[in-house]
Amino acid sequence: MDREFSLRLYRQMVLIRAFEDQAAEQYGRGRIGGFLHLYIGEEACAVGAINTLRKEDYVVAHYRDHGHALVKGCSTRAVMAELFGKATGVSRGMGGSMHLFCANNRMMGGYAIVGGGIPIGVGLALGIQHQGLDQVAMTFFGDGAVNEGEFHESLNLAALWKLPVVFVCENNLYAMGTPLARSSAVPEIYKRAEAYAMPSQQVDGMDVEAMYRACSEAVERARRGDGPTLVEALTYRYKGHSMADAVSYRTREEERAWHPRDPIARYAQILRERGVAEEELHRIDQGVAAEVEDAVRFAEDSPDPTFEDMVRLTYAA
Amino acid sequence: MPVMTYREAIRQGLRELLRDPAVFLMGEDIGAYGGAFAVTKGLLDEYGEDRIRDTPISEAVIIGAGIGAVMTGVRPIVEIMTINFTLLAFDVIVNHAAKIYAMSGGQIPIPLIMRTVTGSGNQLGAQHSQNIEGHYAMVPGLKVVAPATPADAQGLLLAAYDDRNPVLFAEHFALYNTKGEVSEAPERVPLGKGAVVRRGADLTLISYSRMVNVCLEAAEMLTQRRIDAEVIDLRTLRPVDYDLILDSLNRTHRGIVVEEAAKGTSIGGSIIGELQEIAFHTLDMPIRWIAGEPTPMPYNRQLERMAIPNATVIADAAAQMFISPKRRAAS
């Protein structure tokens, strides 16, 4: 893999983690309200997957969507400002952490109804196909979403109409607090694609390059008109479901067992082995830290949206 | 002006919209079958499979895909065979279509027309006889339309296409064969504007969809009792045209809200609630509310008839409003 591109993948993962650490801190200080779902541990999924897309391709995400927004090109400032509920946020402070939208970058939203973004991803692909364009839609969801009817309706329609969509399931093993084995009769999620004659693949979601390779194949398939793919990324969220979660449903041993697979530490090691100097990685880490601190200052200094904004934004004029 | 059925008027409206290459239709059995109520009959032959898309029976993804597709700039018109089945897509309509514009801070409008069929009265049982358009009329971010005449059905459909918001378009199955004049050139009927369909001086009947015709029938009956009823067709249920209602009540000082929907399940209550705030000063007495029985619709023909308001019930209630309070107490 091209050196510059590898460093870009590394930087984006570090950015997401630093962003999430900072978000947790600001949540603790009461500057971020509502639910806050951190993506720590899962960074390789969004980074590996979304980097296979072009700017004009679409992304739909779930409520754990900070990483997807950052990788799809939303500015760190505007994403942080959204978490702060400010008018300068990606969604003007009207959406919040779970609803990051950035139409310019074709980040078509995070959705907070489990599985709710999946049909929308199918629709984006339908719109692309109807216009005869060579774009692709990528829709992310978790392991909890695969037992929703919308998941099955969506896979069936996408396969039936050969729509250019890539379904990326981020399987972090827990649907909120319920382990996959207790919620799914067939816990190998990728196998569900077989029912719709759809190609699928299970990938190490802690390995950014593996994610990139699997999704590249899926995106190419979609782009050349050969229809959808289901990619199951095996990953792990280090923190609770949201900040409100005390994580009583799994053991500390299990959590520790995942740490050697950490997507950032592992990739840093790979880059070192490929000859990237320690100082270079360090420079990236520092640059990211400064970027996130700047985003917090920006969010703090930004104005709130107004009552008039709320009224005006109920209906499109 | 040509006379056509409500069904033909909608079909003609769809043809008009299909002149835009970005428009395509999507729904269950709308193509080869011709539509469960034959509204889209013939369109598959005229426009082909890419424009008239038969879908699986998957209500959530029919509407969800419509939402995603309009985000790319195309204009699908999605159809759910009956309004009862829209409940399978309630999440998609209420949690998604209605909220994306606001949640995105105004970046992403959802100009999606969702056609469906409402109504009761054909002995179709509890699961096929609901008038739940009022559920949707309670949702900020949605617009809800329920036309009563062929001209309105076509005109509102064209206006819904011009609108940049999700519009639930509830056609009434019992109206499909009703006839009316429809202008030759496509004519828009603005969303959010009701119509006075019968002028009257004594009392205002406020209704929509098929019940407008029933109110007109009741108004005819009332002439024999020398009561001159005005009839308002709301046409749009969200937003409701309160200016029109208020203007009428300022002249008649008496009102009845008439709905086919089961009482308490639709918009009648919220309209009356709003009117007691804005029209109290002009009313001679409380607004009356005539609606369907609040029960799952029975199959039995006699019971079903009893569950749905009819002209006699409306006329009797109206006449009661003109009996002096003393006599009313005595009767």
Image (tube, helix red, strand yellow):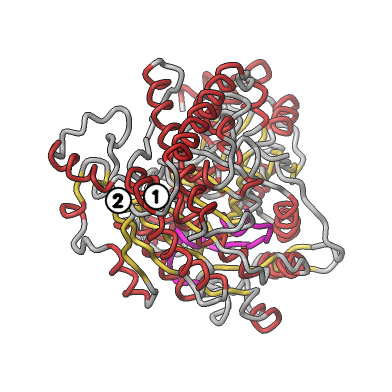
Question: In this figure, which residue is indicated by the disc labeled 1?
Answer: A44
Specify the segment rendered in magenta. Answer: B55-79
Query: What residue appears at the point 61 percent right and 50 percent down from the top-left corner?
Result: A106
Element type at marker 1? helix
Q: Nearer the viewer, mark 1 or mark 2?
A: 1
Left or right: B283 as drawn, with respect to B91: right
Front residue (pair A85, A232): A232
- Residue A172: x and y in percent read 28, 49
Q: Which mark is residue A82?
A: none
- Residue A75: x and y in percent read 59, 36
Tag 2 or tag 1, which sits nearer the N-term?
1
Left or right: B280 as drawn, with respect to A144: right
Front residue (pair A252, B296): A252
Residues under numbered marks 1 and 2 in contact, where contact means CB atoms less than 8 Å apart: yes
For badge 1, the amino acid type reads Ala
Query: What residue appears at the point 37 percent right and 74 percent down from the top-left corner?
Result: A196
Q: Which mark is residue A235?
A: 2
The answer to which image quadrant residue A312 occupies is top right
Left or right: A244 as drawn, with respect to B252: left
Vertically, is B281 above or below A258? above
Tell which subunit mark 2 falls on: A
The answer to which image quadrant residue B103 occupies is top right
Element type at marker 2? loop
Number of residue marks: 2
- Residue A80: x and y in percent read 52, 29
How much space separates mark 1 and mark 2, taking CA atoms? Answer: 9 Å
- Residue B209: x and y in percent read 61, 51
Tell which subunit mark 1 falls on: A
